[in-house]
Image (cartoon, grey):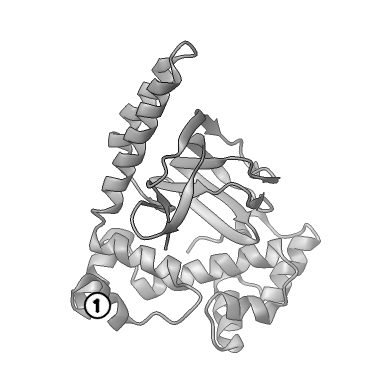
Amino acid sequence: MENLLFDKLPHYIFSANRQFEKGECHMDRIADLNILILMRQGILRFTENGTPVELQGGEYYIQKVGLEQHGEVPSDSPNYYFVHFSDAAYGKGGGLPLRGTYDLEKIQPIITEFEQLGNAAEKLEYEQLFYKLLCTLRSFSRSKSAAERIRAHLLENFSRDVSLEEISKLCFISKNQAINVFRETYGVTPYRYLLDFRLRRAGELLLATNSPVTEIGFGVGFSVYSAFYRVFKKKYGLSPAEYRQLRLSRTLPEDLYFKPE
């Protein structure tokens, strides 16, 4: 997993709140700065160098400078606080993971401090708060629950087979415990969560790319195309090809973008 490293300290540039209107899409751009996103509510959707990203309330995410971002799919009225920063170093080991969860009750006071500084504050004051924010986020990443570790592992490895035995070894618990602790937090089994994520990712790729349908199925973790076809049609009521065609013809109902269970 790639992290924001602290061997070389990043530098604060600018921060503000952001609220999307209903049906608004993420802007198309090549990021000229690094951006830390702190999601409060709603769902933010975009692609980064062709890879779909979906962020929900309680998650943070770091958009790296130089990546091409597009918003082909509407977001669900996301509200978040963002921080632009420069001079970032990235790599494996140590530092802050580029994606994770956080406690808004602990982060909001820092955001409030940012907002209270005003234009007359010295840059050093902003830098101090920025490092306080990064350190607080890092403390959350070091104290993830077993359910959160399982979820992060599923999302990082969704394109390959992930066994229950692998999950149980990750958290040093039995297979049944892994299922139970995950279901208590997210309301579904790890298998169901992974399946739903793969189908959402497939739907995004069908809308945002021209990749062959079979290639998309394999790319999101299905080793047999017929299995991908069957579960996709069960969830969306359409085959993958029909789903793409209706969207391209602008006749796909809005509630089929991400059909709820």
Q: Is residue 249 left or right of residue 119?
A: right
Residue 81 visible to an observer of this rendering: no
Residue 13 visible to an observer of this rendering: yes
Residue shown at 23% from the left, 66% from the top:
181
Q: Quadrant of the N terminus?
A: bottom left
Q: Looking at this view, is 126 or 188 the one in front?
A: 126
Q: Position of residue 115 (x, y in %)?
A: 43, 21
28 to 251, vertically: above or below: above
Residue, far top: 120
103 to 68, vertically: above or below: above
Q: Which residue is mark 1?
A: 169
62 to 124, vertically: above or below: below
Residue, far right: 249
Residue shown at 65% from the left, 66% from the top:
205
Characterize the local packing of mark 1: few (<14), some (14-19) or many (20 or more) Cα atoms within 10 angstroms. Answer: few
Residue shown at 33% from the left, 56% from the top:
94
Q: Is residue 238 left or right of residue 260?
A: right
Q: Position of residue 247 (x, y in %)?
A: 74, 61
Say what amino acid the circle numbered 1 marks: Lys
Q: Is residue 6 left or right of residue 219?
A: left
Q: Looking at this view, is 49 or 122 the one in front?
A: 122
Q: Position of residue 215 (x, y in %)?
A: 66, 79
Residue shown at 52% from the left, 71% from the top:
198
Q: Is residue 256 left or right of residue 122?
A: right
Q: Secondary structure at mark 1?
A: helix
